[in-house]
Image (tube, coloured by chain):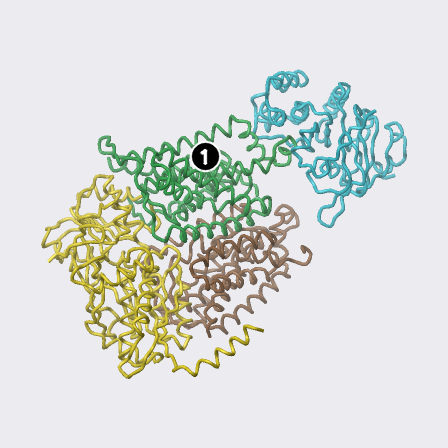
Amino acid sequence: MSLLLRVKDLEVSYGAVPAVKRVALEVPAGEIRAILGANGAGKSSTIKAILGLVKARGTIELEGRPIHGVPTHRIHQLGVAWVPEGRQLFSTLTVHENLEMGAFARGDGPRFASRVDEMFTLFPRLRERRGQLAGSLSGGEQQMLAIARALISEPRLLIMDEPSLGLAPKVVQSLFEQIQAINARGLSILMVEQNARQALKIAHYAYLLEVGRLAAEGTSAALMASEDVQRVYLGG
Amino acid sequence: MKRFVLAALMVVAVPAVAQEKVVHFSSINGQTGQSAAYGSKVIEGVNLAAKAINDAGGVADRCGGKYKVKVTTGDMANSREQAVSLLRQAAADSTVLAVVGPSPSTGYVPMVPVAGQLKIPVIATGSAAPIKEWNPWAFRLNTTSKVAAPGMMKTLKAKLDIKHVALIYDVTQDGQRGEAELIRNSAKEIGYDVAAFEAFRAGDNDFRPQLSKIKASKADAIGIYGATPELAKVVNQMAELGIKANIVTGFGTFNDPVVWDLTEGKVKGGYSWSAYFALEDPARPDIAKMVQIYKKEYGHDPTLYSFYGWDALNVYVEAAKRACTATDREKFRQALNTIENFPTLSGKATFKNPPDGENLSAAVIVNQTTGRGTFEALK
Amino acid sequence: MFWTPVLITAGINSIIALGLYITMSSGPLSVAHAALAGMGGYLGAVLTTNFGWPFALAILAGVLLGLVTGMLLGLLIVRMNELVAGLTTLGFGETMAVIAFNIDYIGGANAFTGIPLRTTLPLVYAVLAVILFVAWRYDHSRLGYAARATRDSPVTADAMGINITWVKSITFGIGAAIAALGGVLRAHYILVQGPEDMGFFISVGFLIFVVFGGSYVFWGPLFGAMTLTILPELLRFSTKDRFIIYGVLLTVMVILRPQGFITRRSMR
Amino acid sequence: MDLFFQQVLNGLMIGSTYAVVALGFSLVFSVMRVVNMAHPEFFMAGAFGAYLTIRYVTTNFFGVLAGGMLVAAIVGLVVERLAIRPVRGRYVMIPFIATSGVGIALQHLAERVFGSDPVAIPPVVPTVSYTLGPLSVTRMQLVTFAIAAILMLGLRYYVRNTKWGRATRAVAERPDVAAAFGVDVNFVSRLTIGISALMAGAAGVSIGILYTSAWAFMGLLYGLKSFVCMLVAGNRHIEGVMAIGLLLGVLEALVSGYITSTLRDAVAFGVLVVVLVFKPNGLFGSYSV
């Protein structure tokens, strides 16, 4: 089982304030792994460090090759795609233009048209909205577009930051089913999620962060039962 | 350590040679910034005159004293504050006898009251702005509109029988604005009407709105009062709009070689009054010599403002000779008042202050531009 | 003394910069302070020259004019964010310059001249010391904290019960009053008050003093105004290249110290 | 009545140049959150570029235009590298001061190299004037208007329909996310500054030839006016900035034609204050600092 992503001794600090202290995690190819933790536990900072959006120390390797210090736009070209927290679509661009931005690095050659169709079949609602400005979509539709924008560049690793944030429970349910479907087609996923119960249902393995430190890790089943998870979430 | 020893040696050596006395003038003008076009030429004229005098053996005053001329230059840029600061610094330096310059009115207008308070002579080299309150310490070498403009309009009325005069002037240039208002106010007295009175600001590029109005006013003479960049554009745009009329200005601006180049000679035939300025004049060997050493020193033609710089320094040296002093500003000021019909490149110089610092014998020649830097005086 | 004129100008610039500092403490990037100083200068000069008022009364009148105008401007821009507020003041400053241009009573384009000499070096630095004390007290006053809260996040300031409209208006007023005071002092030293001193580029100069020096503690504008007024004088040795060097130095220094030269200890 | 249309025509001509220079300002501000105070000097560099090209290279109009734009672009990229990139992303006033310093240095450098007098630009476009009834306009005025129109429409097409244009809009809104999708934000910034410099250079060339002179301080008044255009329009839509530029030109021509040209500049700033009081985010756009 080849290792897609490996992170060791990760340190991130904003000015004098340490946000992430000596975090280590791995994502084997083909797995869904989750990063759990309360607000401010350092989940987003870890993701941003991997994407090169914030200064960090420690080792970050993609398929054995170090990507620490590589500029963000090159990391994307190595097959890493991102669904940012709060989706952050380009609201002044149309749905179609957002997809074109998703495939920016790959260029919009012939394969692009077929990829667009694939996305529209995966998310039919987007086809009707293709000419609309992304800012005018509903919360659920925006989430679909954010995922489509990430998938269209055929990444090898999908990083999702709080995908369920701000969505109605029914929409969250279908969202997690889609994530499983995407993974079933061979795409490894690293997901940051506050909704621990939902995340553990579909993740193979998970890490629990607390105030920037790795509090616990293990298979979903193990974590489901462990009191640590209850303590962090239920303040037991 | 080495430099210290060297300095010590120099101090010891000096007394052995006869005490070399120096007459020190401070030259304040606009050397950088938007008004540098005039100031920089005056500074060149002043420095050249000082060099010429020193090369010819320096100054010998009427009481047997011999001096070398020393000039320190201060750049007021285009700022009123810096002009006044430089004047205060010159006054605070006891070795400075008097201040030469400035040309921009933004410098001269605020310096006049300060010169009176600090009791140090100042002589304007081109500023023609009306001065509300004169004082015994402020002088002016260049001709001003008050004297020249009415004279010119009378001559043009007599020769060309002009009836409708339009005026387009730069509201930010005190001298230019002053003359345009003077011509407007003397309309009835000389016998013409003011067909249009249009203003613009330094830095403008497009004058078509004003010129379209002037074209509609059917004026037969158009007074153009502005600095070189704007004046040239007005002339060019008048041609583009097909406005045909006699063009008139002050301060000999049409005779300036730079204006000739910028308008590709369209100023040919224009009328202006000016102090005396010509690149060559068979009757004037002194001009020929100055133009020759000026071109050798600076590599470009002198303008009327170069003459003003040269003349101002020479008038000051003449006054120093008569006052037999290099430090007593009061005696120097009184000597300035004894200057009468003193010959200069740009005409003559006469000062009687009080009542005011105007040059009473400043040359006023109404002329018509015939070529690049050449003109014909109108009788 | 050779350096007196430069020191007086540096002192007056520091006073006006401190006024701008207080206005900026509640948020707006004002480019009106040159115009406010000019208005103070015009009023003070007219009173002393045409009406023979004593200098102290003329200063008071200038300060009051600045206070009232500043408070009105503060109200005008209360709903705007930092940059837009600054740009509205750009319009105010330039319009004041054009209006002054066209009023012949105050000399129009020929500027108002014949102002009596009143400002001396000791007076300038006495006033500067008082203003520094005022700025120091202001920094530690309730109003000072309220202003900084308003600047950093108006929403929370509002939630904390701070009357934002009042804070913005009074801070703009106090800042404008101090700038007007500087204007009166300048007019009675340069002895001429003209419309050109009120425009955008002059105001930008004061803004550069404050931001360059450090806009989070009152020593900043003092440092900025002093350095950037004396620097061009030091560069006089190369008359021709003076402003090239000045421009390059300004850029280099602000790149090396983007947060301003003088910062609060916590921001070190 | 003819005078009215002549003044409107005069206003459109000068307004087109305000618009082109303002577009450069607003493009850089919207994409990089940088107020580039050296932008007027790109305009001046274009005019001197034209002068140098005419003297040493060619007098073919398009050659001169290319020469001027090239010089402006070079100056633009150097300024981006030295004064803008080190402080991009900082508090809006920091690049404002950094570029102001560069602006001052460039003005006085031009004064040292080309002298304080304006430099005459020989006519490369024959001075022909066309008359339509009472109205008269010169060929160079039409060429200036045409260049402005082509630049503006070209920019609109680039931003709307090209890959890098889309990337520029994406960077303008969310630089981090754009980077995460493979956009090299530094390259886009350089590209944006380059485009704004090319546009300012072209405006500089046409103004230089139209008014037959280039001058070290020609950028000052232009810079202020086009800065005002950008602010009044808000920086979201290109059409907004274009419309405001033309409107400002016409307003100024009418004011100096019918009232007095001493109040002409008050128009630009008076309009600015009125608009910003009622529409604090500019007529068409929005500012988030």
D124 to the left or right of C127: left
Residue ID at (37%, 74%): B24
User: Chain under label 1?
Assistant: D
Circle 1: residue type: Gly
Q: Quadrant of residue C109?
A: bottom left
- Binning the other alpha carbons within 10 Å of mark 1 as few (below 14), some (14 to 19) or many (20 upward) gives many
Taking A220 as reference, is C123 left or right? left
Asked which quadrant contains residue A211, the reply is: top right
Chain with colour yellow in the figure:
B
Q: Position of residue A164 (x, y in %)?
A: 73, 29
Letter of the chain shown cyan in the rendering = A
Give percent across and percent down for residue D63: 38, 34
Residue D11: x and y, percent? Answer: 33, 38
Q: Which chain is green?
A: D
Measured along the vertical axis of the image, is residue B246 above or below residue C46?
A: above
Secondary structure at badge 1 equals helix
Identify the residue position indicated by label 1 in the image: D240
